[in-house]
Every structure is written in structure tokens, then in C-alpha cells.
Image (cartoon, rainbow, N blue to C red):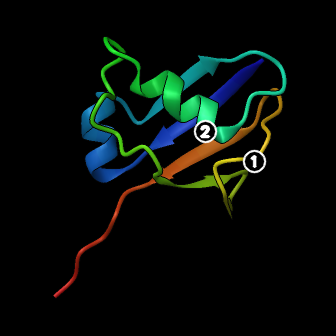
Amino acid sequence: MIVRSLFFASYRDLAGAGELAVELPPGASVRELVAHLRRPGAGLERLPEEPAVAVNMTYSPLDTPLGDGDEVAFIPPVAGG
């Protein structure tokens, strides 16, 4: 299955792109997507192990199962002052 991964701000800088299409096995979860993206050589090794994510525009835990065509947005931490 193909999952659309969206990156913003500092995560976009890590990914080198605002969006990536990632192929995962059927039944994979968000946690497996994160592990796939953090694997050595993938360019996102510095992505947190447990980033905030939204699946299809809803904040979701890492054990959320994914389906073909789902959109996963990675939400970077925000600092204010």
C-alpha cells in the first residue's frame, strides 16, 4: 500500500521535501511508517521516535493502522515566546 507522508517546517528540512509517497506492507501502522522513515540512509534518521502525527487530518496515536492512500502529516514541535 502507498501512504502519503507530509512534512512541515523542520521536518520538511529533514526530509528535503514537503511530501513523500511511502510503500508499506498492508496492515502497517503509523509506528511502522516512522520506523521506515527513520531507517539508516532514508534521510530522516533525526525524526523523533514518537512524533506528533495526524492521519487523514486527525491527531492519531502511533498504533493507528494505515490503509492505502492514507495521508500522514508529521507535526513538528512549536516553540513560542
Q: Secondary structure at mark 1?
A: loop
Q: Amino acid at mark 2?
A: Arg
- Quadrant (top left/top right/bottom left/bottom right) for the C terminus: bottom left
Q: Quadrant of residue 75?
A: bottom left
Disc 1: CA contacts within 10 A as few (<14), some (14-19) or many (>=20): some
Residue lying furthest left in this view? 81
What residue is disc 2 on?
31
User: In this view, which residue lies farthest toward the bottom?
Assistant: 81
CA gap, disc 2 and disc 1: 8 Å
User: Is 55 left or right of 18, judged from the image as shown?
Assistant: right
- Which of marks 1 and 2 precedes in the sequence? 2
Which quarter of the image is occupied by the N terminus? top right
Asked which secondary structure carries label 2, the reply is helix
Q: Position of residue 8 (x, y in %)?
A: 38, 49
Residue matched to label 1? 64
The residue that appears at 31% across and 28% down in the rendered structure is 45
At horizontal 36% and vertical 29% (from top left) the residue drawn is 17
Residue located at (78% from left, 36% from top): 66
- The residue type indicated by label 1 comes to Thr
Residue 29 place in picture, x, y as percent: 72, 36
Residues 11 and 38: in front is 38
**Is the Cβ of the residue at disc 2 closer than 8 Å to that at disc 1?**
no
Q: Label 2 crowding class (10 Å Cα cut-off): few <14, some 14-19, many 20+?
A: some
Name the residue at 52% across, 22% down.
Answer: 36
Label at residue 47: none
